[in-house]
Image (tube, rainbow, N blue to C red):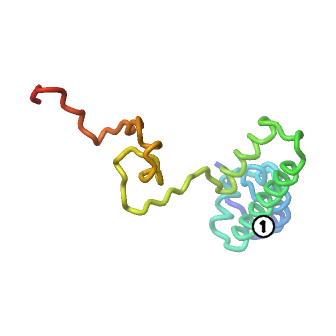
Amino acid sequence: MARPLTAPELGALKMRLVESIPRNWGIVGRIARDLGVGYDTVAKMLDEDDELAALAKQAKATSVDAVVGRLYETALQPGLVTKADVAPVLFFLKAVGGYSETQRVEHSGRVDWSGAPKGAADDADATEGAQAPLSIFRPPKASGGESA
């Protein structure tokens, strides 16, 4: 295990951290490699120093903004974007930027079990021959005179 840093060494390391954080987008592993110190040392300093933590947070936000801007610019140039180009960008935005692919569905609270398409209840042609969607909540129809 490495020896603890002295106060002057910590002060010098903090000054180097202040320079390294923006240059390395606030990513702890990159900062540690840049400074030649351990990952845990950088992580601990960021946890214990609010000023450094805020600087790292700002650096990450700046990197996310840059990636979003670059993705937007690329999207405006038809034919230049391939799936291979977008996949790493989306990974970065999800992993670092907190983006997610979610779909929000709002429900009014009323459920139409008729199976007819919405708005087609008044249209006889739309409901004629239409089958209700399969539902695990609907019991199967009883056939003929059989009893369950």
Q: Residue at x 77, y 36 (%)?
A: 83
In this figure, what is the number of numbered marks?
1
Quarter of the image where the C terminus is located: top left
In the figure, 48 relative to 23: above or below? below
- Decide if residue 107 is on the left or right side of residue 25: left
Nearest the eye: 32 or 30: 30
Residue sticking out furthest to the front: 124
In the figure, 69 relative to 142: above or below? below
Q: Residue at x 87, y 48 (%)?
A: 74
Q: Residue at x 66, y 58 (%)?
A: 43
Residue topped by disc 1: 14
Residue sticking out furthest to the bottom: 51
Nearest the eye: 116 or 22: 116
Question: Picture quarter containing residue 67?
Answer: bottom right
Nearest the eye: 134 or 55: 134
In the figure, 92 relative to 54: above or below? above
Mark 1 residue type: Lys
Secondary structure beneath dot 1 equals helix
Q: Residue at x 85, y 53 (%)?
A: 70
- Decide if residue 86 is on the left or right side of residue 78: left
Question: Picture quarter containing residue 6?
Answer: bottom right
- Counting from the top left corner in percent of width and height, residue 119 is at 47, 54
- Decide if residue 133 is on the left or right side of residue 11: left
In the figure, 129 relative to 1: above or below? above
